[in-house]
Amino acid sequence: ETENPWPRIGVGAMHLSRSHYSDADELGARASVLHAAFDAGLTVVDTADIYAPDDENVGHNERIVGEAVRTWSGGREQLFLLTKNGLRREGGNWWRDSSPQWLMHAAQRSCEALGMVPDCIAVHRVNREQSWTECVEGLMAARDAGYTRSIGLSNVTLEELNHAWEVSGGSIVVVENEYSPRMRDGYDVLVRCAELGIVYLPWSPLGGGDEAAQLGDIYPNFELVATRHDSTAQAVALAWLAQLAQGVIPIPGFSRISSVEAVRPALDLRLSDEDMRLLTSTPAGSGSVFPGL
């Protein structure tokens, strides 16, 4: 258990592995971006074994995150470290493997890359041609073997969440699904997580890349609310997500310290009921950032 209560916003580390780092100095520079996030109070950090610049460097992002967690002055127990397993990549191809054998192997490998046991391992993408029961049991086995403190799910439906909750004896701690102004599918999962006391992490909460920068232009209601609060559309989107239900922690991704600074206003921004109604009634945008994965 982490000593701190859950933060309002977390941090996604994927973007730090868009390219290779050449030496320890460059590794340290990337870790320092996460240090800035942790210092700002963004104390949930999300990674995955598959986040890497190429197939030969699986675990690349976990190594950056492990370095950041290990060298942060605030202390390991102030942070909640989540990684994800269950996607494989080789020869330019990606595929899903939810088998217990793979999940055990991947969990062990993640611990090695991180240099520590994560607070949670989630199955990254469900292979719906494999047994979901066995997948959840595989996560539990990895936990029981000491490779993670707790277990979670990512990119799941309500039916899958309910089944996993039952199979795991109510021990699912985190669900990480896509949710943002552009992508509103699966609201039922968010609501169910709040009912069960599961932390819900919306990934790509600002809609990814170009859309994040243009959020206020694409969704004028978010810009309108930002004007009311003398804030930004991006901060409003993060605050909106955080206020949708108990235990919702959006995890925007960063590759620069300046991006961390841009998120800071969302930490203290409190939206009114009227703001929330307006934002929630705004039509969803173009759907998933990664529709084909």
Image (tube, rainbow, N blue to C red):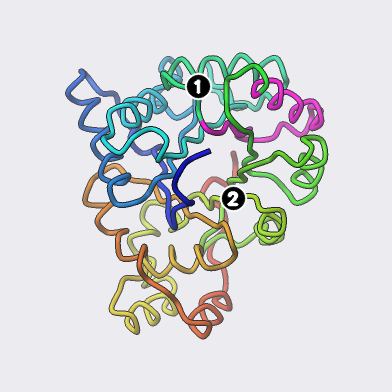
The picture quadrant where one finds residue 172 is top right
Q: Residues within 10 Å of mark 2 (few under 14, many from 20)?
A: many
Q: Is residue 293 above or below residue 196?
A: above
- Residue 207: horizontal and vertical position, in percent? 46, 57
Nearer-the-camera pick, 146 or 257: 146
* Helix, strand or loop at mark 1: loop
Considering every residue shown, the one lying at the far left of the view is 25
Residue position for label 2 = 199
Q: Is residue 109 above or below residue 190?
A: above
Left/right of residue 245 with respect to residue 24 in the rendered view: right
- Residue 273: horizontal and vertical position, in percent? 53, 82
Q: Residues within 10 Å of mark 1 (few under 14, many from 20)?
A: few
Magenta-colored stretch includes residue 191: no
Q: Are marks 2 and 1 in contact (CB under 8 Å)?
A: no
The picture quadrant where one finds residue 89 is top right
Where does the magenta region start and end? 119-143
The picture quadrant where one finds residue 131 is top right
Residue position for label 1 = 92
Q: CA distance from mark 2 to mark 1?
A: 33 Å
Nearer-the-camera pick, 97 or 83: 83
Report the amino acid beneath label 2.
Val
Left/right of residue 123 with respect to residue 64 in the rendered view: right
* Helix, strand or loop at mark 2: strand
For the point 34% across and 34% down, the residue is: 75
